[in-house]
Amino acid sequence: MKYVIQKQVAYKINTFYHNVAKKYKHTYSEEMMHKNLDNAFNSIYKIENGLLKRKPTISRWNGLFMANAGKWYFAYRIEGDTIYVEDACHAQNMHEVLLRNRIRRIVLECIRELNVQA
């Protein structure tokens, strides 16, 4: 299998750990940051090598597959023998994304209900 990792994926992973390093200067070492970066990028290569392929829980990932590897969720597509990793989200942020999607659905249902009653 060949892997093509979009720049956006690398940017999100790098940005996440750099922000952690900035926020926790006194407890999060540069060595820990590099270790976490290595682990995150290495986990990408577990896609289709044992990770469960499943439908995404994030609406922006519709039409892609989703895989969880360690602390990261990845959205990807497969064409032939190539895996295209399109997006990434840290597990810590997944809850925020899912909550936003749930709230959006509830608001839309309320609006539809109000339109039906009007």
Image (cartoon, rainbow, N blue to C red):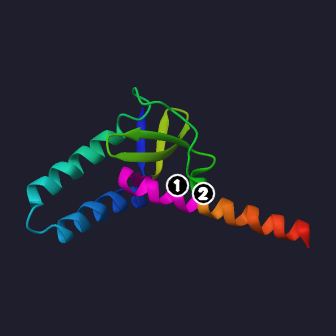
Number of residue marks = 2
- Residue at figure coordinates x 32%, y 57% from the top left: 13
Magenta highlight range: 88-102
Residue nearer the viewer, 100 or 110: 110
Q: Is residue 66 magenta?
A: no
Regarding mark 2 in the picture, which secondary structure is present there? helix
Is any atom of residue 76 visible in this view? Answer: yes
Extreme residue in the top direction: 50
Regarding mark 1 in the picture, which secondary structure is present there? helix
- Residue at figure coordinates x 68%, y 66% from the top left: 107
**Does 91 sit left or right of 29 as displayed?**
right
Q: Is most of the magenta stretch helix, strand or loop? A: helix
Whether 88 is drawn above or below 52: the answer is below
Image quadrant of residue 65? top right
The residue that disc 1 covers is 98
Q: Name the amino acid, label 2.
A: Arg
Q: Quadrant of the C terminus?
A: bottom right
Is any atom of residue 6 visible in this view? Answer: no
- Residue at figure coordinates x 21%, y 50% from the top left: 36
- Residue 100: image x %, image y %? 55, 62
The residue that disc 2 covers is 102
- Residue 5: image x %, image y %? 41, 50
| Residues at marks 2 and 1 touching, judged by CB atoms closer than 8 Å | yes
The crowd level at tag 1 (other Cα within 10 Å; few <14, some 14-19, many 20+) is some
Q: Name the amino acid, label 1.
A: Leu
- Residue 89: image x %, image y %? 41, 54
Q: Which mark is residue 44?
A: none
